[in-house]
Amino acid sequence: MTEKVKADSLVTLHYRLASGNDQALVSTFDGTPATLQLGNGELVPTLEACLEGLAVGEHHTFLLEAEQAFGPHSPELVQRLSRADLPADGNVEVFSMIEFSGPDGMHIAGLVRELDADSALIDFNHPLAGRDVRFEVEIVGIL
């Protein structure tokens, strides 16, 4: 019987994540495959679910609407912050990612959307929130 990917599998795979219009965002197909432990947050649950039931050698492309992939873009997660509240150790530029430390010590990343002398508009949504995505995978191994 052929082994298939399960919800807790350690999987080696090639993958390509692209926007709905097929602009590649990340791909391992031209390099070394990735090895991911499913079920521990290395991959969002909706993308992990696409892998379940696949066998070694299978190659699939999944088209996911925004709500299935990284969810809708939430306006509540876009906040204007004073420049004084920005991390002092980083070079802040428009479209750069900034990492903040939460009260629980957890790190939270935000994208700088706007910047002026007094404040910055920071988007804490996932960069692909609100966007359809194409998720192409080829299962190399199940460990």
Image (spheres, rainbow, N blue to C red):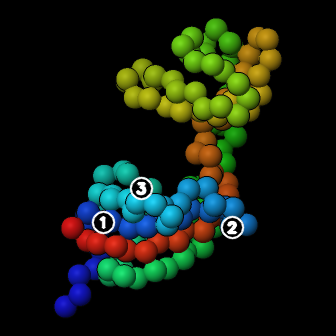
Which amino acid is tagged 1? Val
Q: Residue at x 49, y 79 (%)?
A: 60
Q: Residue at x 33, y 58 (%)?
A: 36
Which amino acid is tagged 3? Leu
Q: At numbered mark 3, what does the secondary structure look like: helix, strand or loop?
A: loop
Residue of label 1: 11
Residue 61 is marked as none
Question: In whole angstroms, how far apart are the C-alphas of marks 1 and 2?
Answer: 24 Å
Question: In whole angstroms, how far apart are the C-alphas of marks 3 and 2?
Answer: 20 Å
Is residue 98 among the parts visible in the rendering?
A: yes
Residue 43 is marked as 3
Q: At numbered mark 2, what does the secondary structure look like: helix, strand or loop?
A: loop
Residue of label 2: 22
Placement of the N terminus among the 4 image quadrants: bottom left
Which amino acid is tagged 2? Asp
In terms of sequence position, does the residue under pointer 3 or pointer 2 come before the other? Answer: 2
